[in-house]
Image (spheres, coloured by chain):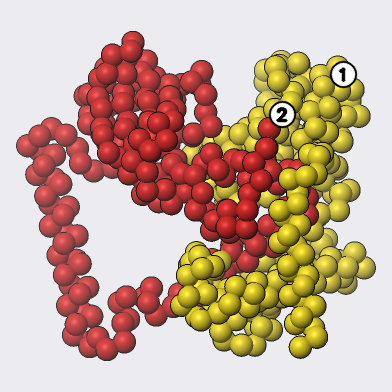
Amino acid sequence: MRVLYYIYQNQKMRVSALGSDKNKTPLNVERAAALARRIMSGDALAENEFVRLNHSWLLFIIRRHFSRSCHHEDILHDAFMVVLGKLQRSKIKTPESILVYLRSTAINIGYEYMKKDKKFSSAVKQDFIDLIADAQDTLLSQLVWDDKVHFVKQVINELGQERDQDILLQFYFHHVSKVRICQNMELTSEHFDRVIYRAKQRLKDLINEADNNNDHGKDSKTNTRKTGDKNIKKLFQSMVLTLFKWQRGVA
Amino acid sequence: MSKMTPDEKMLQDYIQNKLSAEQTEAVDLWLADHPQALQDMQLDLMFAQGLEEIQADNPTDDSQWLHLPGSSFLQRVGLIAAMAVVFVLGGLTVHFLDKDTGQSMSQPDIIMLSTNRGIEDDVSFNHNENTVIQIPAGYLSDDRYTVELLQKSQTIYQINDVTSQDDLLTVFVPKGLLAAGRYQLKVMNLSTQESETFGLAVH
């Protein structure tokens, strides 16, 4: 009972924290605008910081928007390269809206990927973005994201009660509203919050455990294979880009 | 830029893709300023997409309508036979329609427009066949739209009361309607009166 009460209080604090966010000064949007101005004035270091600041956010938007695509990282890379290129050439008139521009560029590129062959992959040299992205600490790395079914299955199995499993399925898969779920299953709002909170907390723990294992090389085989695949892909892309430049007489 | 603060209900609708394109953009931008909420949303997204994949791999009985419990073997065979007849007759009908009208009803060209594309980027296509134009609309939106095709500010073709299906507005443009040239496709949401214009270049 004590544990449940603790969870409930935590959830209440989180919900009230959402409401109090309005009193906080927006940080990332302003920082992004300041970085955009620095890039436009020729500060190359600001480019790294700009990518680092917005990497997780943009990747989340791409994953959410194009859930069935397997080109999330390609879209992300292309979007950053397009926006950074525009900033370097001072083609952005309103740097304060840089995140709006970054988001819509990513979505446009995502639609382009959808229109083109499924095997289409980024033609942009990606090493720069990869380097920065690898260095940053994100909750959901690509390795973890690709294994999401495994994590979600484990959480659902651990929930035990069939009713709790049903709550998750109704909310996340059938998109039934919280109010309707509570009515149909005769739950209180707090009970619903507790189930969702517990499930998310467990998912987070599993992800953190997996990340720690990866860090300690316990899953080194998978890591090596994935890194190898990535390197081959990079090498191939680099070759195509060089060939393209050579044909155009750039190189 | 992101002055709006979403409440709990709005965030739940965001997870469930029930917001309009404008509201979605507002929440997206709000998340840029709220890393903690973003992290929370990442877990929600993982659940939503993970469950979708799990369900796709293991469809439940209610999605396997051919295996409905209680239906006999003969009923199932009959259902499949009926489907085959409809399929074959449908194909023949399309063939005759094609001959009589000179308009092919099969495999129209499909063009997908992006709501974030500005008017300066025209979408080019050949209009030698019937053309289907698809425009992304608000998620699970019940709003009604008017779609207008214009050339030099003159309306060429207009369809009223279009509703979205699978988050897409679908407009059928019959073969021969558009001559080569530049056109604007204007989409107006009748509920919000917001409109968006796309450039089209017909070869």
- Taking the image as shown, residue A5 lies to the left or right of residue A177, namely right
Nearer to us: label 2 or label 1: 2
Query: Relative to the observer, which residue lies in front, B23 or B181?
Result: B23
- Chain hosting mark 1: A
Query: Relative to the observer, which residue lies in front, A31 or B46?
Result: A31
- Residue type highlighted by circle 1: Gly
- Chain (yellow): A
Does residue A107 show up? Answer: yes
Quadrant containing the C terminus of chain A in the rendered view: top right
Does residue A129 show up? Answer: no
Residue A42: assigned label: 1
The residue indicated by pointer 2 is A98
Q: Colour of chain B?
A: red
Residue that protrudes farthest toward the top in the picture: B152
Q: Alpha carbon of mark 2 to alpha carbon of mark 1: how far?
A: 16 Å
Mark 1 neighbour density, 10 Å: few (under 14) some (14–19) many (20 or more)? some
- Chain hosting mark 2: A
Write the residue at 25% across / 32% down. B159
- Taking the image as shown, residue B50 lies to the left or right of residue A141, namely left
Q: Quadrant of residue B203?
A: top left
Q: Quadrant of residue A162?
A: bottom right
Q: Quadrant of residue B51?
A: bottom right
Write the residue at 37% across / 77% down. B62
Residue B174: x and y in percent read: 22, 31
- Residue type highlighted by circle 2: Ile
Residue A92: x and y in percent read: 71, 19
